[in-house]
Amino acid sequence: MGKASKDKRDAYYRLAKEQNWRARSAFKLIQIDEQFDLFAHADPDSVTRVVDLCAAPGSWSQVLSRVLIKGESFGRRAWLEKRRRDKKALEKVGKESENTQEGEQDDDDTEDESIILKPRKNVKIVAIDLQPMAPLEGITMMKADITHPSTIPLLLRALDPEYYEEGSEKRDTPQSNTTTSTKLPSRHPHPVDLVISDGAPDVTGLHDLDIYIQSQLLYAALNLTIGVLRPGGKFVAKIFRGRDVDLLYAQLRTVFEKVSVAKPRSSRASSLEAFVVCEGFMPPEDFDSTHALQNPMFGGAAVSKETNEDGTVGYDIPDDDEKPQQSRIAQYVPATANGDALDQLTLAEQLSHPPPHESRWIPPFIACGDLSAWDADASYALPEGYVSLDPVQPPTAPPYKRALEMRKELGGTYGKTKLGATGRA
């Protein structure tokens, strides 16, 4: 399939190249921001420190750079600003008809420019991924594994390199609670305002396996987020909606005041992907950020301090005498930061007969993006004379690079080998 065919089939793939985005996923973050105001446009100083997990090829980091550092606007917000500029231009035409002075016109032009670009001060953005990424203006790139415990110290040093330098005077403050210059504080002194993650595993086609691996990737991102996110901060991550995804929602609800599920219009309706938007972070008490990834199964992040007699945490396993038919099935009791249970889900009862609606916590499912926007599942006719563009940033080191090289050596990019082309055995 050629580039023109992809442009016709996927409108956002075409728009990403036309608007200089590295990937079509940039529109997903823009549409989520339109609905949830992730970047706090009304109060720019409240969101200046952001961490982008699983950032390659860098489309979400590109959005962060252009919105926070350069001060650009996109989507519906840009359309509203354009309407205001057009309205002001019509007013200027009316003033010119009344012999308005030229000096006042120049002042109006300066004011229009301030409406277009609104850069923020003291912006710090860190992007992490296993794959190398092409550099972006004002963004710190890290090649690291978010599931590995060593990533937390690297991220903390990337956020505040001066604070974690050897012999730094800033680390001698009481809030660090350190005795040596090599030990990291249990809580980061300068937490971030927003953590986003568009990471997903290489899908195998086995939906249950893909959903499970994706959930483990989200748990690793969440444990890392708890170590660096400020109280009241926001967390956005990709999820795969499966049969028991409400268990994941309940776990997220233990450390966030509000949890919503967003489906951007640029995300195909045929896809199981969605984005969980968590607002109002409630950090667990006595949580050590340096050990946030020791247990990526969410065990030490948001459960209550009390443990069961059998050593488990956050689970209530019934005794055989009380419920012999459910002896091997655990009941999940999510706990808030204060130790209060939100809900109780019994897997045995769920399998035997569905529980009533009030026994399950269901987050709101919100469709993001204007209805007049392009449909990600539709095919559109290309205009006459349309020229297909090359991708803005091809992958620097894709895992399939060797496979493409071998395919080209055998005779072509689209699977036609030399033996197949000649028809000889």
Image (spheres, helix red, strand yellow):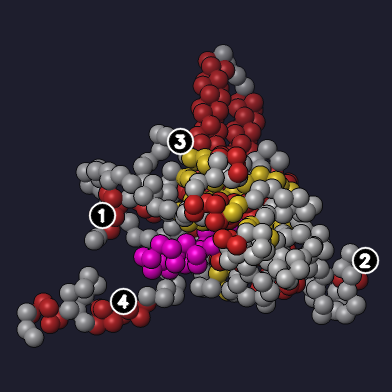
Task: Give how far apart the Cα atoms at labels 1 and 2 are.
Answer: 61 Å
Q: Secondary structure at mark 4?
A: helix
Q: Secondary structure at mark 2?
A: loop
Q: Secondary structure at mark 1?
A: helix
Q: For this view, does 414 lie left or right of residue 340?
A: left
Instruction: For label 2, count other residues whose C-alpha is less than 10 Å away and answer few (under 14), some (14-19) or many (20+).
Output: few
Amino acid carrying label 1: it is Ala
Q: In the rendered image, which quarter is residue 37 located in?
A: top right
Task: Give how far apart the Cα atoms at labels 2 and 3 are.
Answer: 49 Å
Q: What residue is pinned by disc 1?
A: 4
**In what quadrant of the picture does the N terminus appear?**
bottom left
Q: What residue is pinned by disc 3?
A: 370
Amino acid carrying label 2: it is Pro
Q: Residue at x 33, y 50 (%)?
A: 10
Q: Position of residue 88 (x, y in %)?
A: 56, 25
Q: What residue is pinned by disc 2?
A: 174
Q: Nearer the viewer, residue 289 or 346?
A: 346
Q: Position of residue 149 (x, y in %)?
A: 67, 75
The residues colored magenta run: 196-215
Amino acid carrying label 4: it is Leu
Q: What residue is pinned by disc 4?
A: 404
Q: For this view, does 66 lie left or right of residue 279?
A: left
Task: Give how far apart the Cα atoms at labels 1 and 4 are.
Answer: 20 Å
